[in-house]
Image: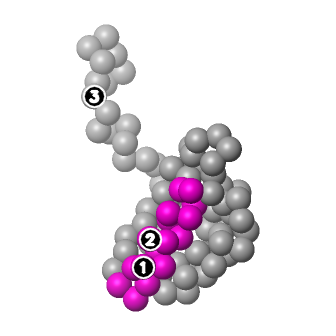
Amino acid sequence: MTGTIGRARPGNRAAPADDLYELVSERQGRSLTITSNRAPSDWYPPFPNPVVAESLLDRLINTSHQVIMNGPSYRPNKRPRNSTDKTK
């Protein structure tokens, strides 16, 4: 979701960040699955207001179960092969 926030329209970064904050706030105490390829510390720059970012991360991290996956990406194995690609 932070990728979506990072691609917000120029000059209006607050709207997607506020939407994410509102979603997490409404779902507090209930199930919510969030995936990211960024560490929590990398979530601050997309938020125009650091207080909102801190509050959001506090709500997420203190009540979450984190699954950290390291290793090669699974995506290249599922990418359609080009008929001219002779590597495989």
Residue in view at x 70 percent, y 59 percent: 48
Instruction: Answer left or right for 37 relative to 82.
Output: right
Could you tell me how far apart the alpha carbons at marks 3 and 1 are, in whole angstroms? 39 Å
Residue flagged by tag 2: what amino acid is it? Answer: Leu
Could you tell me how far apart the alpha carbons at marks 3 and 2 are, in whole angstroms? 35 Å
| 10 Å crowding of disc 3: few (<14), some (14-19), many (20+) | few
Instruction: Answer left or right for 71 relative to 33.
Output: right
Residue 49: in sight, yes or no? yes
Residue 67, image x, y percentages: 44, 72
Residue in view at x 46 percent, y 49 percent: 72
Instruction: Answer left or right for 55 relative to 64.
Output: right
Q: Considering depth in this image, is 11 or 58 the residue closer to the camera?
A: 11
Q: Mark 3 and 1 residues: CB-CB less than 8 Å, in contact?
A: no
| 10 Å crowding of disc 2: few (<14), some (14-19), many (20+) | few
Helix, strand or loop status at disc 3:
loop
Q: Mark 3 and 2 residues: CB-CB less than 8 Å, in contact?
A: no
Q: Considering depth in this image, is 15 or 58 the residue closer to the camera?
A: 15
Q: Which image quadrant is residue 52 in? A: bottom right
- Where residue 57 is drawn, which disc sits there? none
The boundaries of the magenta stretch are 15-30
Q: Which image quadrant is residue 49 in? A: bottom right
Residue holding disc 1: 26
Q: Considering depth in this image, is 35 or 81 the residue closer to the camera?
A: 35
Q: Mark 2 and 1 residues: CB-CB less than 8 Å, in contact?
A: yes
Residue flagged by tag 3: what amino acid is it? Answer: Pro
Q: Nearer the viewer, mark 3 or mark 2?
A: 2
Residue holding disc 2: 23
Q: Nearer the viewer, mark 3 or mark 1?
A: 1
Residue in view at x 43 percent, y 47 percent: 73
Residue holding disc 3: 80
